[in-house]
Image: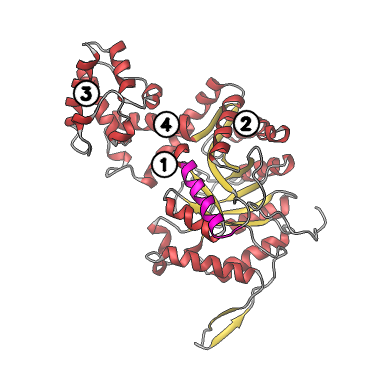
Amino acid sequence: MTNDEIISELRTLLKKQKQLKVDVDGIGIETRFDQIGFDSLSILDFMYEVENSFGVFPEMVELVKMQRVSDLVDFLSANAKS
Amino acid sequence: MTAASSNEPPRYGSGPRAKWPTFSLLFFANAPAEAEIGKFDLFRASSKFADEHGFEAVWIPERHFHAFGGIFPNPALMAVVLAESTNNIRIRAGSVVMPLHHPVRVAEEWAVVDNLSEGRVDLAFAVGWNPNDFVIAPGNYDDRERIMLEGIDCVKQLWRGEPYEADNGKGQPASVQVHPLPLQKELNMWMTCAGRIERFVEAGAAGYNIITALLFQKMEDLEEKISAYREARQKAGHSGPGQVTLMLHTFVGKDEATVKDKVRAPFKHYLESSADLWQVGESRLKDLSERKKADMLEFAFERYYQQTALMGSEETCSRIVESAHRAGVDEIACLIDFGLSFAEIMDGMKSLDSVRREGITK
């Protein structure tokens, strides 16, 4: 998968997160997670969807370090099973 | 015991900032409220260590009705223990929940401690956030901010020996004075600031020091708020930058991996019982699926450990202290009792003291 394909899929998954008040189409590679408005519940809900799509879930120690979409994209690019 | 000094104790926050924060202990105690011998052993032993090694203060909380910190419902009582068992360390309420008390009683109790301790009392004040705490004073909940501010002013006046004027039991105007008079002529005072920048600015304008935590804010956000606090202080004409005290969950050890392994289980348990208090979003932790509950705790642990705790090797912790100091923090109040064993905590005190002592050579 290319990075663009990964981001496109992430946007689709973000759109499913109804409680997030954010313009999903405006989200790009440099968007920060705190701009997306995740809290500890919603980030997990999102990451379970990511797991369903990409077949992989990061270690919590790594997830906590992720600040931007690019960090997640890098992780998925290196580890995704689909 | 040292002889009573004729000099007034330091005016915290009135002088220039030091090059390294000072270190204090702060207790919270995730201990069950059931009867059990030895509940206060850690309090005594670690306070004694802190006193003997030159820590700045011991902060005692006021917590009601919950196993989470519930063994400290009245800081003045624990302060008497410290007055009798320590010689040098400052004895601080962190904090008096002002709307739960009559200001006359606050002034009386702490004046007693000030005498017993030969002038070592400092006080922080909080507004109170848990509605259940207000079973003690139900009429004070709605207006608690104003009541706190008025209460602090009243305590200040009574401390100086000024009369308290109010109606007595017969509805007649009475004028009373608090006894005993404290040893210190003026009180060092702190205001507890949780996250809202307005509270930081209020505290600055009023000339208080501040005590805060990284519960509802990150270190980066804190820097901005401390600046606003100092600006408000300066604008209102108060001398000195004010003292900023930051509460941090603390455990320092010899190496990173060992520390993280040691703290993982007790700290997660601590977070779990505190989540019960804070209520994550709309749902409580116990209503979630097993996986989600486990993941949330693991996520919370990692986030707290990496971003808001003073935990790790001496080197890691030095870097954290440095970044706190850069953000404007002057004093680290170390929350040491989040669940490790007595022996582990006392062992960790030596490494904590090493980090503290870096300030001596700076």
- In the rendered image of this protein, does residue B211 appear above or below residue B166? above
Crowding near pointer 2: few (<14 within 10 Å), some, many (20+)?
Answer: some
- In the rendered image of this protein, does residue B117 appear above or below residue B169? above
Give the alpha-carbon distance from disc 1 to disc 4, as whole Å: 17 Å
The chain containing the residue under callout 3 comes to A
Specify start and end residues of the magenta stretch as a single range: B222-238
Residue B276 found in image quarter: top left
Query: Which residue is tagged 2?
Result: B348
Give the alpha-carbon distance from disc 2 to disc 3, as whole Å: 44 Å
Q: Name which of mark 2 and mark 1 comes first in the sequence.
A: 1
Q: Looking at the image, is mark 2 or mark 3 nearer the viewer?
A: 3
Helix, strand or loop at label 3? It is helix
Q: For this view, does B290 lie left or right of residue B236?
A: left
**Numbered tag placed on residue B303 in the rendering:** 4
Q: Is residue B156 visible?
A: yes
**Numbered tag placed on residue B6 in the rendering:** none
State the residue at coordinates (80%, 59%): B4
Q: Amino acid at mark 4?
A: Arg
Helix, strand or loop at label 2? It is helix
Query: Which residue is tagged 3?
Result: A10
Pointers 4 and 2 in contact (CB under 8 A)? no
**B83 in the magenta segment:** no
